Image (cartoon, rainbow, N blue to C red):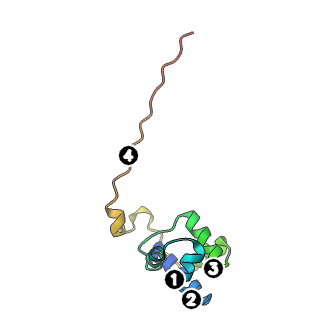
Amino acid sequence: MEISKAFGKTLRRIRDERGLTRERLAELAEVEYTFVYLLENGRRQPTLTTIFLLARALKIAPSKFIAEVEMAKPTYSGRGEKPTPAASKEKPAKKMVRIKRPVDSE
């Protein structure tokens, strides 16, 4: 199971255990309902900030939340995971260029 799917499965399980709807979780975590839906379905991956917001809303420590995701035994395929439809439309990152500054000859 991909990491994003394991995260979504864990998020849904904990949300259900807390008796929260997606709408209520989104409201408590201050995120959009559709984002919670996409997370639960493994179509988006959360940022660290989002993990903390969701954990607070679910009344669970972020570390415990991540430990629960690990217990789902996700596969660690690195960057080789299939991109989500939105991710495939993103522009590639720009290449960083180092600019050499002239050395003062004083």
Image position, residue 77 (x, y; %): 44, 67
Q: Is residue 10 visible?
A: no
Residue ID for mark 4: 94
CB within 8 Å, label 4 to label 3: no
Instruction: Please name the residue shown 53% across and 71% down the image.
Output: 31
Image position, residue 44 (x, y; %): 44, 70
CB within 8 Å, label 2 to label 3: no
CB within 8 Å, label 2 to label 4: no
Residue ID for mark 1: 22
Q: Is residue 81 above or below residue 38?
A: above
Residue ID for mark 2: 16
Q: CA distance from mark 4 to mark 3?
A: 37 Å
Image quadrant occupied by the N terminus: bottom left
Instruction: Please name the residue shown 62% across and 68% down the image.
Output: 52
Q: Earlier in the sequence, mark 2 or mark 4?
A: 2
Q: Secondary structure at mark 4?
A: loop
In the figure, residue 96 lies in which quadrant?
Answer: top left
